[in-house]
Amino acid sequence: MPEGHTLHRLAGALERAFAGRPAVVTSPQGRFADGAALLSGREVEEASAYGKHLFVRFAGERTLNVHLGLIGSFDVLPHAGTPPAPVGAVRVRMVNPQTYADLRGATVVQVVSPQEVAATIARLGPDPLRAGTPGNDPQRSLVRLARTGRSVAECLMDQSIIAGVGNVYRAEVLFRHRIDPFVPGAKVKPRSWMAMWADLVDLLPYGVAFGQIITLEEQLDVARALLDGRDPAAYDDSWGGIMPGERGGFVRGGAIAPFPREYYVYKRDGQPCRVCGSRVRSAVVAGRTLYWCGRCQRRH
DNA sequence: CTCACATGTTAAG
DNA sequence: TTAACCTGTGAGC
């Protein structure tokens, strides 16, 4: 389930659970034993995310860099005294007196230096979840977009152009702006691209706050009401957000109000477009399935 | 139970 | 363009 919102949410959970104290780091599965030994016992200084990269900085200039890939997961859970025995292939386990975190299935798990962290970040385009901070000016993505013949759908998935967008947000944001996915980047109106950027800046924090991708306008209305005026970007679970691992649920005052996984076009091929009723289409583009409405998203 | 497939990326051909 | 990697899930038998 990892697009950028997942990693930023995870960084927040790790930060709240582990920062400022030492953590015991192990590799129950064994494949990260050396890396774990380099980190174990050190204080966790900070957890952060850039695009789909996660960085957990430990004392002594050693940072755990994780990329979940398509199927990775990093569960952050409370324990009462002793964490349970690992289930499945747990590549990395972090433990402190209250919390344990299990990493499985990630494609990148490595201990890196501050220079390597900087180099990884330098390869990424601006991240809508870091809008307004240095290095995250959307103008930088626009410059890249404006001089490529590759389709706008490909550009949205190119992490060096814009960081954190994945296959779901791509399809959904293109639909929300009625943009033809196959239009070359250079032919996209700058205003359209900036509008998509602004939309992602608005949408992604709801993904972070609720732990799921929310793009339907009616669901966003509910999400905003549940946040009751709070800024989703300031998410922290002290107000009753869901715990990582509770995938898709929203807990408040004991009630769970999960959002059904519904989208405008993602995974809806063959079904009628929610706006115009025309059949939603799909095609494999650069190895990923793209979904769009051929009528709503004609031209741009 | 088995099997395709998944919100990702890289490297080989 | 395709295969490979890593794990969980849900559809179908």
Image: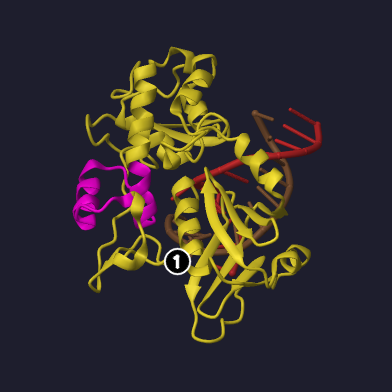
Chain colours: A yellow, B red, C brown
Tell me: residue A131, above or below residue A33: above
Looking at the rendered structure, the secondary structure element under dot 1 is loop
In this view, the residue in front, A63 or A92, is A63
User: Can you give x and y, in whole percent of width and height, for residue A138 in the image?
Assistant: 44, 28
Outermost residue, bottom side: A81
Kindly identify the residue that appears in the image at 23 percent across and 32 percent down: A277
Kindly identify the residue that appears in the image at 51 percent across and 37 percent down: A163
In this view, the residue in front, A178 or C9, is A178
Q: Is A252 placed left or right of A172 in the picture?
A: left
- Chain ID, mark 1: A
Q: In which quarter of the image is residue A150?
A: top right
Q: Is A281 placed left or right of A272 in the picture?
A: right
User: Can you give x and y, in whole percent of width and height, for residue A2 in the image?
Assistant: 50, 50
Give amino acid for label 1. Gly
- Residue A210 in magenta stretch: yes
Q: Is A282 placed left or right of A222 in the picture?
A: right
Q: Quadrant of residue A275?
A: top left
Kindly identify the residue that appears in the image at 34 percent across and 19 percent down: A191
In this view, the residue in front, A150 or A51, is A51
- Residue A295 in magenta stretch: no
Q: Decide if residue A199 is in sight here.
A: yes
Q: Looking at the rendering, in which quadrant would you find the C terminus of chain A?
A: top left
